[in-house]
Image: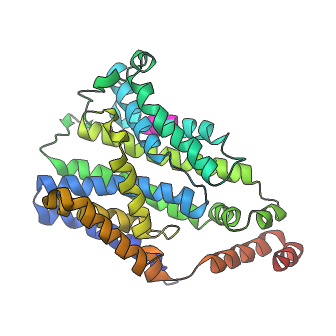
Amino acid sequence: MKALKLSNEQLIFYIVFGVFGILPIFLNGNLAIMNILTMIMLYAVVATNWDLMMGYAGIFTFGNVAFFVIGAYASGILAMSLGISPWLTIPIGGAITAGIGVLISLPCLRLKGAYVALITFALHMILEPFLKSDMGRAIGTGGAQGLLSIPPLSIGGYTFSSLQPVPWFYVAFGLSLVSLYVTHRIINSSWGLSFVAVRDSEPFAKSLGLDDFRVKLMVFGIAAFFTGMAGAFYGHFVGILSTRVLGLDLFLLLMVMQVVGGMGKFPGALLGAIIVTFANEGLRAAGVYRLVIFGAIVVAVVVLAPDGIMGAILGGGKGRRLDRFRRFARRAFGKETSEAGDSV
């Protein structure tokens, strides 16, 4: 019988989720800690899919928090206005977000670097006034008041309660596990190798016949879908939504998670979400000095481990990833492509 071999990335991934899966047994339903663990699971989804865009595909985007909020509002409006079960509105919210993500990506795909960042950040900036506007109220956003009394999840006559955090955690755990597992499979598939090739050497990727337009469109759609689902779950978990979620606090927190974990280093965003969330909560007692201390810790991590925690663990770099893509291309396209790859 063939022995099961796990890479270092897979081993860390399964260990982290294995530990998180049994933590509620030892916490006895501690409300504060369980809520933090639930948010870590959601942050891991958003940060990982943001890293899929920036770390793997090289798309410098600032629109992922907007995707999170769009998914949250879409699911909340559908559940409140049409009475649809949250179990259906969560994936529908993800699908709506993916559609918007693809539309937003269209003007971005022929641009690079800071120009893409500006367009996607424009979505972030425009979203708040839209949600508060008369047009936003017309579709059920609640305007400046936001959404109140978003229905919680329920199953078999049991309604999830904020006073019983364990069921909420395990749904978030399942969502995070599935999202990160799918993302990992994508990263290690021909799709993922195409993302990396377009990022590292776009001319080389085009010489192999890769359509960079299609590759980038795919990245936007996948990342927006899972980010929207995480936002949709968040809306039902907290029960209320307002445009405060679009503030810089969440934006910066998610960016720091990627940097600390290691961009383009799966599952670095997961480790970053754990470390940064606990550090952020632990430093609240420091009051006004919290951001100063937190910033100093981030600077120290960046200086000591410029490729993040996963980069320090795994090592490697751009050259190794490009060599990996060349090997894949040779198998897929044959000898002629091999010679083209060697000449790059």
The stretch drawn in magenta includes residue 95: yes
Q: Is residue 47 left or right of residue 144?
A: right
Q: Which residues are magenta?
A: 91-96
Residue shown at 39%/46% (left/top)? 230
Asked whether residue 299 appears in the rendered view, the answer is yes
Quadrant of the image occupied by residue 292: bottom left
Q: Residue 251 at x, y = what percent?
A: 39, 50
Q: Nearer the viewer, residue 256 or 233?
A: 256
**Relative to 325, residue 121 above or below:** above
Labels in figure, total: 0
- Residue at 34% x, 27% y is 79
Figure coloring: rainbow
Image location (x, y in percent) of residue 163: 12, 44
Quadrant location, the C terminus: bottom right
- Between residues 182 and 254, which one lies in front from this camera angle? 254
Q: Where is residue 252, by image quadrant?
A: bottom left
Decide whether the magenta segment is chiefly helix, strand or loop.
helix
Q: Nearer the viewer, residue 5 or 180?
A: 180
Residue 44 within the segment the image draws in magenta: no
Using the rendered image of the protein, determine whether residue 178 is visible from the camera's viewpoint.
no
Q: Residue furthest right?
A: 336
Could you say where residue 340 lies in the image, as x and y percent from the top left? 86, 74
Measured from the top left, where is residue 190 in percent x and y?
A: 67, 64
At horizontal 13% and vertical 60% (from top left) the residue drawn is 285
Left of 327 or right of it: where is 317? left
